[in-house]
Structure formats: C-alpha cells, structure tokens
C-alpha cells in the first residue's frame, strides 16, 4: 500500500543543526519515536565532537544545492532547522549556485528583522520542494508543559511580576526585538534586545552588585515569551541549565515561560539545577500569557 | 501695589539639587532671568565642590521640615527638584517628624513605579503649601529645540530608525521603564531599563566589539523620549556631553530626542563634541515623535 506522498509521516527527517545541545536532543526524541533522522551540522555553529559518533553531513550556510541533493537522496521531505546561530562571518558561508540564484531573496531578508530573514529562508526551502517544520512538531516533548516544574513555586508578588512581564512582551512583540525581560517588585528591570538572554541576566547581576536594583536578592523573575509574529518553525524561546546559572548569579527567584511554546534544553539537568538553587520554573498557559 | 500671592512670579525659587551639573545650569539660567535662587543640595547626590562658592543649604533626603523652614523664611513658594538621584542608601536619609508623618505615603509611593514615587513626593510638598515646578518651566533654555543642532544630519535610513525608535518607546511608555533605545538598520538593538542610558550605550559598544551587531559602524541612532505618564516636573530625559562620548564608543551615527521635552546639559560642549565626532543631534517635534 502506498501512503499519499504529501503525508509520508515516517520518511526520514532532515535536521539542520546549529550550535548547542538542542539539535541532538531533538534528534534523539525523533529517533525514539521510530523516525529516521539525517543530521546536517552547520560549519561554524555545530561542535564537531557532538557529531563524531553519528552519521552526518556537514554544511556551510548557503549550500542549498548540497543539502537538497543529499536530503532528496535520503528520501527526506520534512526538514527542521534548530540550534543557535550567531550571525555568521563571511568565511563560514559558501554560496553555491542555488544560493546565488536565491541571493536577491536573501538580501531582501537581511534588510528586515530576524523573523523576516528566517521566513524568507523558509520560503526558499519550500520553493525547492521541502517542508519546513518546527522542532516542537516533530519532538513535542522538548516543550515546557503548563504548571510549576520545580519544588519552588512563584509567590504572590512574583505572580504579579510574571503578569507584568508578559504584558510588556505582548506590547513589544510587534517590534521583532527580544523575547525576554526581568521584572522585580513590579518594575521592568531589564529588557533583552540584540544581547540575548544570558547577557541580560549578567547585566542584572551587575546592577545588583552596584546597588542600582530595588528588588531584594532572591526576588524578581525572568519572563520569556515568543514574539507575536514569530515563525515557530525556526526560533522558539529556549531555556536550559545555563539559564538557571544566570538566574542564580542575577539573584532572581525564578523563570516563567509560555507552556507549549518554549523549548527546554536538557530538562532533567535544568530542573535538578533549579531545585538545587531553590529557583522556580513555571510554564504559564498561553491563554494567560497572551 | 500688592501682586496676588498665588502669582508671585519673581519670588525666590527653591532648587533641590541632586547630582550632576544640571542643577547649576538651571540655577544660572533662572538667575540670568533676574530671579533669586535658593539652593538645597542633597547629601549623597550633589558634589560639595560644586556648591562651595554659592550660598546653599544641605539637605538629607527626608528633611521636609528643615527644607520647609528655610524655604519659607527665604520667601520661596515655587520649588524645582533636579539632578540625578541614585536610589539612596539608608545612611543618606534622615526622616524628620514631617517625613515620619508622611511615611505611609512614601511607602505607598515606593511600591509603585518611579513616576508614582515622584508624583507622591510632589503631592507631599504641595500639601505643605509649596508649588512644584518643572525645571523647563523656570529655565526653558535648557530644553532641546526642534531641528538638527549639529553639522551632521540624519540620513534617510537613520530617519527610519528614529521613527521606529519613537514607535517602540510609545508602545512601552505605559510600563514606566526606560526612556531610550538604540535602533540600527531598522532593528531595535538595545532597550534601556534599570541600567540607564550610559550603560546601555556601553553594551552596544560591546555588541559591536564581539560582532553581534548587524548595523555597520557609524550607523544606528540613540532615541530618547519622555515616558507617556512621566511627571515632567521631576524627570525629563537628559543628554549631555557624556552622551556623545557614549555614542562615539558605540559607533552610532547620532541622537534623536523630543524637542521641548528633553534637557540638554551643557549644550555648547555637547554640540562641540558632536561636531568634532561627526555625530548628529536632532530635536524631533513632539507631534512627530508621539
């Protein structure tokens, strides 16, 4: 019996892998579901050691042709693009002929915001017959569930800070900026833009050290949400064990994310680190966070 | 002939002085208009050397009674509160009996945002018969005028960045957060919250150094605006020569502020420094910035 070609749910999945441990977590989750995975680590982003024991095909950014050839030969139609990607230096890009043909689109994309860039890249894959999926579609267990995940829970005041944080992120969502704020004592203390969450948390730690923060140590919350226009196939807010380390250094009480719309990298290690530090992690249902 | 008591425009002005050079600039501007000024530098904020050659009365934060006694004896009814005020340590506060009576109001005030705090302090002065004025009312020449103040002018792309910056600040105004953003290449690159403008600019300089910024050096704009609910008698956005230094280190092209709603500290030095560095400074009419 032939399954309709546009369903093909168990055809191999092509996974284009940026940096960090998340691509491997997704690969393991997909494989555990019985679906084969073809790994495409990206030069300059993925760590070669992580891929040493797994079959893989290195790509430079821009090697659309090489990717398409290998992925098609392996029978892949669905692809997922996951992992961190610092803006690449020119040495890490190889424009093959397919990319050169797409260059006007890429340049247009770079002029918009991050989301714009990613959506345009998505379109380029789709014009070549691939279907771009979100990591959460192929590996739903990587997403934060609703509810308190840790022994510690947000107290009354922190629930107010969490609500204020989501309200702020809702107001700034249309601007395609950061996805995170730190709120303490009903004040927005730090807003993430180009620097990223880890550096924002380091700033809060510094503001505490130099006495510019009102909120007492052990209070205040990191609040993360997807941007309103965010293309979830590319870029969901992510927390991991290193986020907990940043929270501890910043003297905050916990982390609030949107349930079902936030990736937790290494969830066991994250919860263990949070419980050790007395930090709470809560997944807020989307209806309450939006 | 007796002037009506509630006008008394040339009665001496009481100036409560925080840190920085702005209080003295306001004092000089008011005095140049022929109005006597009584200076009240604040312990822990004002620099004693700045006041050595001028008659003055030191105050600790919380000394409402001492202030009221001296100000009334000097015939002051109008008061202006100006200069930087890092959140005070307990050692810099002296609660006299008047302040103790007002303590419930102060504590209420501390629970709200900064604006809330300041408005409540304003009410406390007014309940004691003083009229709280904005520095811009008594010294209008300290405000940024409309138009380009420098030899350099914003280019087309920077005008777009300026518009985006004001749009972002309009959206976040209700949150009583920072008053400034850095925008480059139609991206919001940094958002000011508790850290203040100078530290935000230092962050942008760092993002350039570590290659996380898209915008080429010599592009991007610092955009400052008053918060929407801001009580202008206390806290107007301020730029000065040190802002230009921060702009240069951050590799930005210029500064955009709201004309008539932004204080320029040491305007001559600021414009000289900006012209030397090829930086633009533009006052955008409020109708266009809002």
Image (tube, coloured by chain):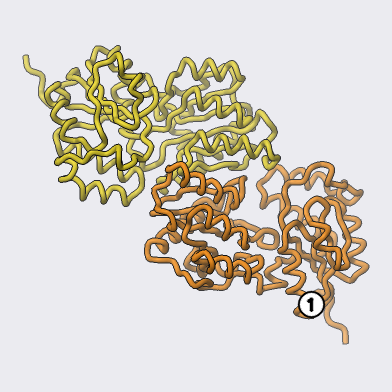
Chain colours: A orange, B yellow
Decide if residue A142 is on the left or right side of residue A279: right
Does dot 1 land on a helix, a strand or a loop? Answer: loop
Q: Position of residue A35 (x, y in %)?
A: 80, 77
Subunit that carries the residue with mark 1 = A
Q: Taking A110 as reference, is B256 above or below it?
A: above
Q: Taking A67 as reference, is A77 above or below it?
A: below
Q: Taking B161 as reference, is A136 above or below it?
A: below
Count residues near mark 1 (Cα–Cα under 10 Å), then give few for <14, some for 14-19, many for 20+: some
Q: Residue furthest bottom?
A: A1
Residue indicated by mark 1: A9
Q: Position of residue B214 (x, y in %)?
A: 69, 40
Quadrant where the N terminus of chain A sits is bottom right
Q: Position of residue B34 (x, y in %)?
A: 24, 12
Q: Residue furthest left?
A: B1
Q: How many marks?
A: 1
Where on the picture, by quarter, is residue B64? Answer: top left
Q: Is residue A204 visible?
A: yes
The residue lying toward the viewer, choosing from B18 and A84, is B18
The residue lying toward the viewer, choosing from B65 and A141, is B65
Where on the picture, by quarter, is residue B285? Answer: top left
Say which residue appears at 41% left-offset and 50% top-offset: A187
Say which residue appears at 33% left-offset and 29% top-offset: B18
Decide if residue A188 is on the left or right side of residue B151: left
Q: Position of residue A125 (x, y in %)?
A: 81, 59
Say which residue appears at 82% left-offset and 71% top-offset: A37
């Amino acid at each position: 019996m032939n399954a309709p070609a546009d369903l093909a749910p168990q055809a191999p999945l092509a996974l284009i892998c940026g940096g960090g441990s998340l691509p491997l977590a997704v690969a393991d989750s997909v494989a555990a579901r019985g679906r084969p995975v073809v790994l495409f680590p990206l030069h300059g982003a993925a760590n070669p050691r992580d891929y040493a024991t797994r079959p893989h095909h290195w790509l430079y950014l821009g090697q659309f042709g090489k990717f398409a050839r290998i992925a098609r030969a392996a029978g892949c139609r669905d692809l997922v693009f996951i992992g961190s990607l610092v803006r690449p230096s020119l040495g890490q890009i190889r424009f093959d002929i397919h990319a050169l043909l797409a260059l006007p689109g890429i340049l247009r994309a770079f002029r918009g915001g991050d989301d714009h860039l990613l959506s345009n890249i998505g379109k380029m894959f789709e014009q070549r017959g691939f279907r771009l999926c979100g990591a959460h579609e192929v590996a739903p267990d990587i997403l934060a569930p609703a509810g308190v995940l840790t022994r510690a829970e947000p107290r009354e005041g922190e629930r107010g800070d969490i609500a204020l944080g989501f309200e702020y992120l809702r107001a700034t969502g249309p601007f395609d900026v950061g996805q995170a704020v730190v709120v303490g004592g009903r004040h927005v203390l730090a807003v993430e833009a180009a620097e990223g969450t880890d550096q924002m948390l380091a700033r809060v730690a510094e503001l505490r050290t130099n006495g510019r923060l009102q909120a007492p140590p052990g209070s205040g919350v990191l609040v993360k949400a997807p941007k309103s226009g965010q293309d979830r196939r590319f870029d969901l807010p992510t927390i991991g064990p290193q986020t907990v380390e940043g929270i501890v250094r910043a003297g905050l009480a916990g982390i609030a994310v949107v349930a079902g719309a936030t990736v937790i990298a290494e969830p066991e290690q994250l919860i263990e680190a949070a419980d050790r530090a007395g930090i709470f992690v809560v997944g807020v249902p989307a209806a309450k966070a939006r």
